[in-house]
Image (spheres, helix red, strand yellow):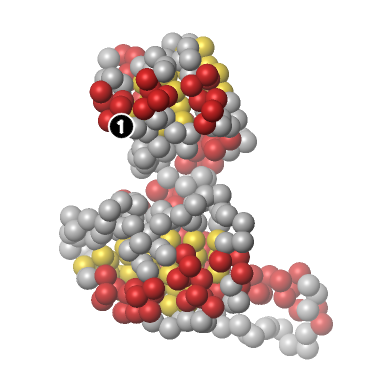
Amino acid sequence: MKIVCLDADTLGFDADLSIFNKFGEFKSYDKTPANLTIERLKDADIVITNKVLITNEVIANTNLKLICVSATGVNNIDLEAAKKREIPVKNVAGYSTNSVVQQTFASLLMLTNNMNYYTNYVSSGEWAKSEIFTNLDKPITEICGKNFGIIGLGEIGKKVAKIAQVFGANISYFSTSGKNNDSNFRQVSLDELLQECDIISIHAPLNENTKNLIGKNELSKIKKGAILMNFGRGGIIDEIALANAIDDGNLKVVLDVLETEPMTKNHPLLNVKFKENLIITPHTAWGSVEARKILIEKIALNIENFLNN
């Protein structure tokens, strides 16, 4: 078998891909532009890709026997073309749950505890000049007692709900598919969730049910001073309307995903007035050291199962 990884950089500089050598010849590229995809897969039996598109053209001009996606989503693969040529497409699910949940609360606590302000207050030398032992210039609020709403109650959403419950929050959820019914938590409509909740956390995939789910109208229903977080997919929230809502001073926001990644230059969210009310991370919530290790191991398992069958 010849195995080609098209975008190893997306797995992190410290990713150990040596496990794939046991299956045969392994070739890894840091990045692959679209115009080089076919050339690099010319003699490949198996491809590993995260974001590089495997289109109908790519499939028609290569001899792939297995497509491995180093992620959960498979929207970068032409599934119909792969099916027509009887090429299995294998993704990896569930590897990043703990990582995403951890960053959800790390980001939330940065906002509720005004961590940026207080760490800067100390590092700038201002605390050393103080005449009293403390500083409470910025409010610190508790999660306990807050209404905590979750949009998308899959594996990640459920774990966020359980941890928020430990903090003492009141949990409700909106099922974007309409299929998740969990008696442990209160199910509500989207409007109810937006209007009631002090903290809203999105953990849903991007599909026909969630595209532009949160637009200008929905943002206007959210409580003043509430926190809105998106750890699902970009495209669920209208980002221009979101920037305007932050500028109005009514909303605090955490984003780990954007509709276009990497972030575009002069994006409206780069120019919001209340920058202290916005945290954006570059799609990193999935990528703990442990999660990436599991991901690589499960890709190898997908290859092993394919070869054994």
| Total number of numbered discs in the rendering | 1
Q: With 57 as the anchor, is 14 left or right in this view?
A: right
**Image quadrant occupied by the N terminus:** top left
When the figure is inspected, residue 122 is found, relative to residue 234, above or below; the finding is below
Quadrant (top left/top right/bottom left/bottom right) for the C terminus: top left
Task: Kindly identify which residue carries mark 1.
Answer: 79
State the image coordinates of residue 285 (x, y, percent, origin top left): 49, 51
Residue found at x 60% / y 77% = 273
User: Observer-nearest residue: 125 or 40?
Assistant: 40
Q: Residue at x 40, y 25 (%)?
A: 57
Mark 1 packing: few (<14 Cα in 10 Å), some, or many (20+)?
some
In the displayed structure, would residue 307 be above or below residue 84?
above
As drawn, is 48 to the left or to the right of 122? left
Residue 264, given in percent of the width and then of the height, sits at: 57, 55
Q: In which quarter of the image is residue 188?
A: bottom left
Q: Nearer the viewer, residue 264 or 104?
A: 264
* Residue 168 lies in quadrant: bottom left
Q: Under tag 1, what secondary structure?
A: helix
Q: Could you say which is closer to the camera, residue 225 or residue 206?
A: 206
**Type of residue at label 1?**
Leu
Q: Residue at x 26, y 20 (%)?
A: 86
User: Could you say where residue 283 lies in the image, as x and y percent from the top left?
Assistant: 51, 51
The image position of residue 246, as x and y in percent, is 51, 75
Q: In the rendered image, is residue 159 in sight?
A: no
